[in-house]
Amino acid sequence: MVISDKDELRYVSGLIVLFLPLLASLFDFWSWIVEVLLIFSVLFQTRSTGCRRTAIFLGIGYILAFIPVGISGISLIGFTPWAGILLVVIKEKGLSTSQSIFWSLLLAALIGALPVIPSVNQALQPENLEKNIVTVLQFYEQQGLFSAFQEQGISIEQLESTLRTMVPVYYQLMPAFAGIFAMLEVGLVYLFFRIFSFGNKLKPFSLWRMPWYAVWLAIIGIAAYLGGDYFANSILRITGMNVMAVAASITSMIGLSCLAYLIKSLKFSHLLIWIVVIIVAFVSPFFFICLIFTGLFDLVFNFRKIPEKMEEQKP
């Protein structure tokens, strides 16, 4: 019997799905590298052996992962690869690729955010918050940055006031940061899988879209934030902030896609334009906000008039 390269990859990916969670828990090495390997292996296995068998393998793998750490170690285990299972399941149910990716990204964001919430709650306790702010001030002092700030006309009191405003916001948005990172894992692995594994042709970046109802993510975030602010409910307000941050990460990508669509119609060097766009995006917060709102309104108005049923090949 001749074993082809494709068969070897199927066996290897199956072993990864089954035993990598156990090894990651055993050696306390859960990281984005482990999750990326699992997501890619999940996508490959679903292509080779079907979604149901892959989900069973992954389930067994995660059960084995609890052996070294026990149920109490659930916060040490990363569950983002299950978003890859959801992507394939929804796609097999007949939904479009954009819809499948949207729901899998939401699940990835939720899976990434939930384990961070206890740490955020702990960090936002007044005594811990004060300790962290003092630690940052001491770090600035040790690095000799106080004099640099004073040369720019920023007093130590102003710096401390800014930190007391920004540090709590940073901790409040930590679930969103973790969720966005999990979304990047799923999205980039899926793109890598589609491009390099089977050579399937993707839609050009300038034609990327999300389903129109993705706008409700932003609406829910805004409503939760305003409701929490009105009723003085910090949990509702912080939840709204995080939902809005996740929505902004999605709509900013759609905004970039709209910009790419516009750039294709210009006669200037596309590479030069993209270099300028990337530089401006990192330097100008206003430009980044414009991208967010462009993507947000494109969800509803479809500025590029892209047909809803325009799909690339199946994964």
Image (cartoon, grey):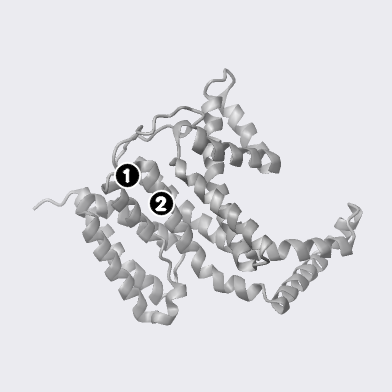
State the separation of the CA atoms marked 2 and 1: 10 Å
Q: Callout 1: 10 Å neighbours few (<14), some, many (20+)?
A: some
Tell me the residue that label 1 is attached to: 95
Q: What secondary structure is marked by label 2?
A: helix
Work out which residue is located at the far left of the displayed protein and give it. Answer: 1
Amino acid of disc 1:
Leu
Toward which corner of the image does residue 120 lie, by quadrant?
bottom right
User: Which residue is at 72% across, 79% downward?
Assistant: 127
User: Which residue is at 24% across, 65% downward?
Assistant: 56
Toward which corner of the image does residue 235 lie, by quadrant?
bottom right
Residue 211 can be seen in this image? yes
Q: Position of residue 67 (x, y in %)?
A: 34, 80
User: Which residue is at 51% across, 33% downward?
Assistant: 301
Identify whether 36 is placed above or below 259: below
Q: Quadrant of the C terminus?
A: top left
Q: What secondary structure is marked by label 1?
A: loop
Q: Is 220 on the left or on the right of 126, as rendered?
A: left
Identify whether 4 is placed above or below 156: above
Work out which residue is located at the far top of the displayed protein and give it. Answer: 267
Q: Callout 2: 10 Å neighbours few (<14), some, many (20+)?
A: some
Label number found at residue 103? 2
Identify whether 179 is placed above or below 257: below
Q: Position of residue 170 (x, y in %)?
A: 66, 62
Amino acid of disc 2:
Trp
Q: In the depicted view, which residue is nearer to us: 40 or 296?
A: 296
Residues marked 2 and 1 touching at CB (< 8 Å): yes
